[in-house]
Amino acid sequence: MRRFFRENSLSLAFGVLFLGSLAGQAIAGWHQLNDELFADGLDRITLGSYLTSSSFAVDVTENWQSEYLQFLLYVMLTVWLVQRGSPESKPLKDAGQESDEKQKVGAYARPDSPKLARAGGLRTALYSRSLGFTMGAIFVLSWLVQSVAGWAAYNETRMQQLRDPIAWGSYLLHSDFWARTLQNWQSEFLAVGSMAVLSIYLRQRGSPESKPVGSSHEATGVEG
Amino acid sequence: MRWWFAALALLLPMILSGCGSGQDAAVRDRAAAFQDAVATQDWAGACALLAPETRTELEAAAKLPCAEAIAEEKLPAPGRPDRVDVFGTMAEVRYQGETLFLTRFADEWLLHAAGCTPQRPKPYDCALHGG
């Protein structure tokens, strides 16, 4: 059991952080919404009602979609785009999808390679892109749920202001939808871009996200 | 995969906005009860269907008890509702020449605003409203 925890400590730690943060967001968001409802002379809602409300759903999914978009773009763009000196980049000469031999697929698969890497044809082609497909699917679904939940939450606010609700199609072109979306995207792109650049010159001893401390600033695609 | 997206797109609005037929019916019934009370001049009955803040503001503005204050508002007596929209804790019922806004208090729907006429793109101008 101890070995299991030690060998999976990274994913377990982030799982705990995620659940703790989500629970904290639920409690804080519930109090925030009830504070607003009280100020408007409306009835406060239970925690159970808040957890199934469009307000909670939109606040959660607008962050999820942007995180998965960030990793989708990072996974996809780093196939072709490089950054000299960054451990986040491949070596400059390796830009592109690379050879079957280097990717260990088909005839070049090793004994311990996944079966789908050895199968060839469509199955290997799909498996070769499964990380991007999965990240992309979660991004699209999260963004879709954000759009629906955001539409419902925005219409609830409009009615509190004695205004007619709008259609979902209109909401997709509305500033509320794009403000929620773009405020998350800009922060993700800034974080990824700055990580790619700062890691050229700065080091974190022992982290695979950094080059070894003594590596040259010119060394590209080297992880510590 | 395509059917799955289509199902999600159709189901999510209903799930997330709470606009199932149960809520629509409850809102429609409560709006009809208010309209009946106004039509029969059952002012005490109409006041009982107002949200607390709406009732407080009505009494404060008229400086009269609710039943007398609401009688002076000359609320219209519309016919069948054209459209009912429910999103979370708020609902809107549109009639010809009148719109009602309702809000959910615990397990029941109460009148948030009544006697509302459109001023698009501004909010409705309502004879009585809370908040």
Image (cartoon, grey):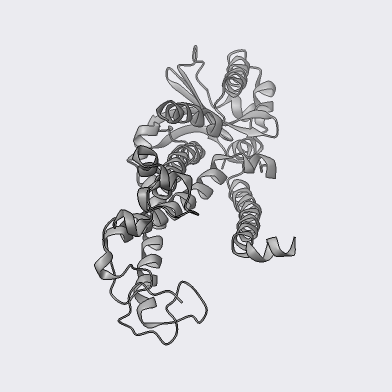
Residue in view at x 40 percent, y 45 percent: A133
Q: Residue A26 at what x, y percent from top left? A: 63, 51
Q: Is residue B29 visible?
A: yes
Residue in view at x 43 percent, y 50 percent: A131
Residue toward you, A17 or B116: A17
Which residue is most to the right?
A1
Residue toward you, A88 or B75: A88
Residue in view at x 50 percent, y 45 percent: A58
Vertical position of residue A83 compared to residue A16: above or below: below
Q: Residue A166 at what x, y percent from top left? A: 40, 33
Q: Is residue B120 visible?
A: no
Examine the image and state in which quarter residue A50 appears.
top right
Vertical position of residue A132 compared to residue B46: above or below: below
Q: Residue A5 at what x, y percent from top left? A: 69, 62
Q: Residue A175 at what x, y percent from top left? A: 35, 47
Vertical position of residue A12 compared to residue A165: above or below: below
Answer left or right for A18 relative to A177: right
Residue in view at x 59 percent, y 64 percent: A10
Vertical position of residue B106 compared to residue A56: above or below: above
How many numbered marks appear?
0
Position of the N terminus of chain A, as image quadrant, is bottom right
Residue toward you, B70 or A4: A4
Which residue is most to the bottom?
A214
Answer left or right for B112 relative to A172: right
